[in-house]
Amino acid sequence: MHDWLQLNEPLPLSIPTVLANLVIGMVLGLLVGWHFAKFGRTLGNRQAVARILIIILLTTILVISIVKASLALSLGLVGALSIVRFRTPIKEPEELAYLFLAIAAGLGLGADQRVATVVSVVAILVLMMAYSRLSGQKQKQNLYLNVEVPADSAGEDLFPRLTKTVADHVTTANIRRMDLHDKLLQATFFVDCQDDNELFSVIDAMKTSFPTATVSFIDQSQSLEG
């Protein structure tokens, strides 16, 4: 009976051990975040996602470090996690892969499997980097830029100005369609961008040169590749 009661009593945590795991986790989190920001192909602000990966990794270490010392806490964790709902959907499979990698690293460090965790994470990141290099470092993107501008807001040189604004901020810009009706110019460009900064620079340039313009991007690479 006494032994059964001891199962419900959490063992005291070793503060130096937890701190050591958190330090190693911070280094791994920075490495995983840097890898995602550097080699990720997801459109959007990858730096923001990279910062979240570090927090997830460290939080996982803390949770596992606490519950592994108590059977009651581990059972309670199952019930607590069953009511958690994520309101923000993960749209890119690549983000999900890095998220699982961060959680796996946190689980390993929380269980004090430091060497195996560090070696595994580094090996996975090296493999992903090599695959990215072999596949050309960057997946071909089919980006289309749609612009709508009131035709009476910029004079007769509206279309040349619009074309120049787009071409000055992307690697390649080809006009695919242009419609002019009801004093509204609608243009569609096929654009090739080196990174997300070029996309943001186009939007900023449009806001400056054409404050009343409506700008939208469509990425058809996934649909075309199946």
Image (cartoon, grey):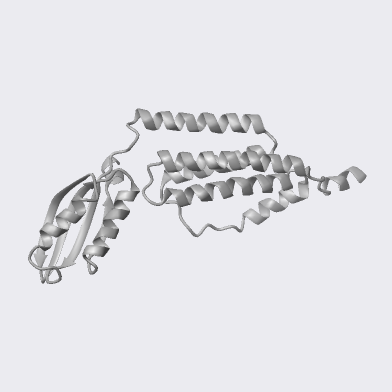
Relative to residue 210, is residue 42 drawn left or right? right
Is 196 in front, or is 178?
Answer: 196
Total numbered badges shown on the rendered structure = 0
124, above or below 30, in the image: above
Question: Can you give x and y, in whole percent of width and height, for residue 120 in the image?
Answer: 57, 30
Question: Can you give x and y, in whole percent of width and height, for residue 112 in the image?
Answer: 70, 36
Q: Does residue 214 appear in this view?
A: no
Relative to residue 57, is residue 11 drawn left or right? right
Is 11 in front, or is 26?
Answer: 26
Question: Can you give x and y, in whole percent of width and height, for residue 111 in the image?
Answer: 69, 38
Relative to residue 151, is residue 112 drawn left or right? right
Relative to residue 47, is residue 17 drawn left or right? right
Location of residue 214 (image quadrant):
bottom left
Residue at the far right in the pictured view: 2
Q: Does residue 34 appear in this view?
A: yes
The residue located at (81%, 48%) in the rendering is 10
Question: Can you give x and y, in whole percent of width and height, for residue 123 in the image?
Answer: 52, 29
The residue located at (26%, 43%) in the rendering is 224
> The C terminus is located in which quarter?
top left
148, above or below 164, in the image: below
The residue located at (78%, 46%) in the rendering is 70
Is 23 in front, or is 174?
Answer: 23
> The N terminus is located in which quarter?
top right
Location of residue 129 (image quadrant):
top left
Is 154 in front, or is 58?
Answer: 154
The residue located at (41%, 38%) in the rendering is 39
